[in-house]
């Protein structure tokens, strides 16, 4: 084939031929631009480029919506809208003897008075501190809620007090008279401890039993 070849239109698909005029009109490098800008494709219908600003803030991104942003918020992904939106992140940890005044869902509180840990849980209808499964490691008996060590002294023992439902410290009995179920009234030589239905009391040995108790026949 000899002579000039004339094409009817500009190329629109891969492998289409292009005229010199079309190639000359392509802007391979756009003039201008400022510091920090980048060249990007300006249109889906041609190969023109343009200088554009790079996003430097989260709020300028297409998939981020910061409407209603408040102090302490985190960005939470919403699969329904395919966007990142402000939300309550929770997750703060506090150590104190009293519960935090303004907790948020997911916050953790270690009660230094009892050694117990709690997580703040919001279920949609209510919010409350929920004790975590592991009660923690206790460094002292005194931090346990069912132990009362008032007036603790050397030699005390830990005994259960049914009246208060607590373990309390008491001086252990070292004599029969110190036992709670024993009543000794001026014990005399030869007396024995007999149970009277409520306490052990000191009494003289009954005559019918004395030969057997004393080893006689």
Image (tube, rainbow, N blue to C red):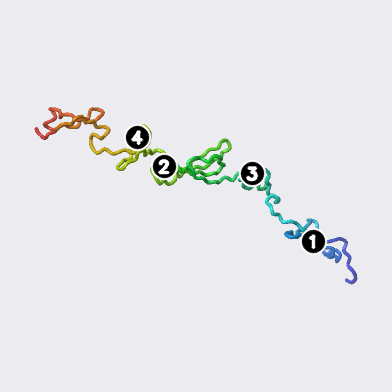
First along the sequence among labels 4 and 1: 1
- Residue matched to label 2: 143
From the viewer's perspective, tell me whether residue 128 is left or right of residue 73: left
Label whose residue precedes the other's in the sequence (1 or 2)? 1
Give residue 15's quadrant in the image.
Answer: bottom right
Q: Mark 4 points at which residue?
A: 161
**Disc 1 marks which residue?**
32
Q: Distance between the residues labelled 3 and 4?
A: 52 Å
Between discs 2 and 3, the one toward the N terminus: 3
Which residue ends up furthest to the right in the rendered image?
3
Quarter in which the C terminus is drawn: top left
**Residue 82 vs residue 113, the one in the foreground:** 113
Question: Is there a contact, CB below 8 Å, between mark 1 and mark 2?
Answer: no
Locate residue 6, reporting x and y percent. 89, 65
Residue 178 percent across, percent down from the top left: 25, 35
Please give the label number shown on residue 70: 3
Q: Are marks 3 and 4 in contact (CB under 8 Å)?
A: no
Q: Which of marks 3 and 4 is nearer the N terminus?
A: 3
Q: What element carries label 4?
A: strand
Q: Give the quadrant of the N terminus.
A: bottom right
């Amino acid at each position: 084939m000899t002579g000039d070849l004339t094409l009817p239109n500009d190329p629109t698909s891969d492998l289409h031929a292009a005229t010199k005029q079309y190639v000359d009109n392509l802007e391979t490098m756009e003039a201008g631009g400022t510091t920090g800008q980048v060249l990007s494709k300006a249109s889906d219908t041609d190969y023109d480029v343009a200088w554009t600003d790079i996003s430097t803030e989260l709020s300028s991104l297409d998939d981020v919506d910061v409407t209603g942003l408040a102090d302490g918020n985190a960005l939470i992904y919403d699969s329904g809208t395919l966007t990142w939106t402000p939300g309550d992140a929770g997750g703060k940890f506090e150590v104190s003897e009293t519960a935090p005044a303004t907790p948020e869902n997911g916050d953790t509180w270690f009660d230094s008075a009892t050694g117990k840990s709690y997580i703040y849980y919001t279920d949609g209808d209510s919010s409350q501190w929920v004790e975590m499964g592991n009660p923690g490691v206790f460094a002292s008996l005194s931090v346990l809620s069912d132990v009362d060590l008032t007036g603790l002294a050397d030699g005390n023992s830990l005994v259960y007090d049914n009246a208060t439902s607590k373990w309390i410290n008491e001086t252990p009995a070292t004599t029969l008279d110190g036992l709670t179920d024993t009543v000794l009234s001026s014990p005399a030589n030869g007396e024995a401890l007999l149970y009277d239905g409520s306490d052990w009391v000191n009494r003289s040995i009954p005559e019918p039993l004395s030969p057997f108790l004393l080893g006689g026949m």
